[in-house]
Image (cartoon, rainbow, N blue to C red):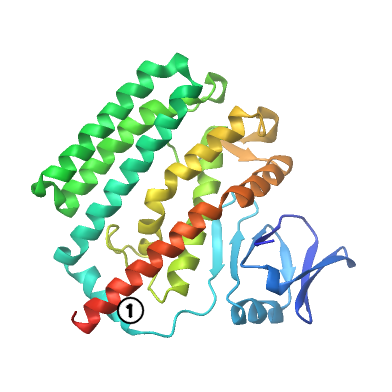
């Protein structure tokens, strides 16, 4: 076990030695040893002892609390950060210097577009009926990548964001074709999510964002200071940066959920125009996310560690 998902009413979490004890309506239902956990995700009105927070923090076990209604993050606990403060000092220099930010941002956009292209190419053999739409989308992404690789004038932060937007347009023109018309998925729409696909993408991105917060925090970085996303009140810009190249992994996985009919229309409900994943659907979603999140989490750790080393070198003047 890597992540414990708690999504049930009248649930109480207590600390029992080196384990979390689970109680429902006052009756003990089981326990989970702490050494098996890296993360805990709670949704809705789950009660827990204050000692549980201390135990999670002491063992660097991340905690994510989702709102009971909309499955959006309301609180996070990321554990203890790395002790090397020079990493954060170097990160502050990067954040304030566009000449240091631009190469990192250029790398990020290229890696993201490459992942988008890979996602559509993998879909081609499975959807021969969409060959034209997918091929056109891949060609558009190829053209954008080639310009970014060869034209040094395209490396400013503003131009990179423009090209990322153009790539997103090309990518979603192909991605939307992969889903059944009955799902009404016509593009990325965040708040509120109007259809089942956007509801799943939003929840998947929320979980991925939490993984990015955890990875960057443990590496000794300030999650609020990014190199591609500007500083914004209340936003963990570095986590937003690190998860960008990994969004296509979530997109592919969500497509699989609907393609294999793991999730179906009966797993969703409508709340005044907002599409919600019901309890049965969330059970499938969390289980599948945990089974497929390993590659993304490993990449987040690798990205965070590499960035932390680079920031430390910048601080040390090397």
Q: Quick one: SS at disc 1? A: helix
Q: Nearer the viewer, residue 229 or 247?
A: 247
- In the rendered image, the quadrant that contains the C terminus is bottom left
On the image, which quarter does residue 199 sit in? top right
Residue 88 vs residue 128, the one in the foreground: 128
- Which residue corresponds to the image point at 38% horizontal and 73% vertical from the top-left? 221
Q: Is residue 91 visible?
A: no
Q: Quadrant of the N terminus?
A: bottom right
Vertical placement of residue 184 versus 69, above or below: above
Q: Which residue is mark 1?
A: 87
**Residue depicted at 50% across the width and 44% down the height:** 250
Classify residue 129 as left or right of residue 229: right
Question: Whole-percent x and y of residue 224?
Answer: 37, 68
Q: Is 312 left, or right, of 245 in this rendering? A: left
Q: Is residue 228 left or right of residue 71?
A: left
Residue 195: image x %, image y %? 54, 32
The residue at 28%/48% (across/down) is 109
- Residue 295: % across, % down: 51, 52
User: Exactly how many numbered labels are in the figure?
Assistant: 1
Looking at the picture, does residue 261 appear above or below residue 30? Answer: above
Seen from the viewer's position, the closer of residues 200 and 107 is 107
Please say whether residue 41 is visible from this viewpoint: yes
Callout 1: 10 Å neighbours few (<14), some, many (20+)? many
Q: Is residue 207 above or below residue 145?
A: below
Seen as rendered, the residue at the extreme right is: 27
Residue 149 percent coordinates (x, y): 17, 45
Q: Residue furthest front?
A: 125
């Amino acid at each position: 076990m890597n992540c414990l998902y708690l999504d049930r009413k009248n649930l109480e979490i207590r600390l029992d030695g080196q384990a979390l004890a689970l109680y429902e309506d006052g009756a003990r239902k089981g326990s989970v040893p702490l050494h098996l956990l890296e993360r805990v995700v709670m949704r809705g009105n789950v009660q827990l002892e204050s000692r549980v927070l201390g135990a999670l923090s002491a063992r660097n076990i991340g905690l994510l609390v989702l709102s009971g209604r909309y499955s959006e993050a309301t609180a996070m606990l990321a554990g203890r950060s790395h002790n090397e403060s020079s990493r954060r000092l170097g990160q502050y220099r990067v954040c304030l210097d566009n000449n240091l930010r631009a190469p990192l941002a250029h790398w990020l956009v290229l890696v993201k577009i490459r992942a988008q292209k890979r996602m559509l190419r993998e879909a081609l053999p499975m959807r021969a009926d969409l060959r034209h739409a997918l091929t056109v989308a891949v060609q558009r992404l190829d053209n954008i990548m080639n310009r970014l690789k060869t034209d040094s004038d395209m490396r400013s932060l503003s131009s990179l964001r423009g090209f990322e937007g153009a790539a997103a347009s090309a990518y979603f023109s192909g991605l939307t074709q992969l889903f059944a018309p009955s799902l009404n998925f016509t593009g990325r729409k965040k708040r509120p999510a109007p259809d089942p696909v956007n509801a799943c993408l939003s929840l998947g991105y929320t979980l991925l964002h939490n993984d990015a917060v955890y990875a960057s925090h443990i590496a000794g970085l300030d999650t609020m200071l990014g190199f591609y996303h500007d500083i914004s009140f209340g936003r963990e810009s570095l986590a937003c940066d690190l998860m960008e190249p990994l969004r296509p992994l979530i997109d592919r996985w969500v497509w699989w959920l609907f393609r294999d009919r793991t999730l179906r229309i009966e797993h969703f409900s409508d709340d005044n125009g907002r599409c919600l994943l019901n309890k049965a659907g969330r059970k499938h979603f969390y289980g599948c996310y945990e089974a497929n999140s390993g590659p993304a989490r490993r990449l987040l750790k690798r990205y965070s560690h590499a960035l932390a080393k680079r920031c430390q070198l910048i601080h040390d003047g090397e």
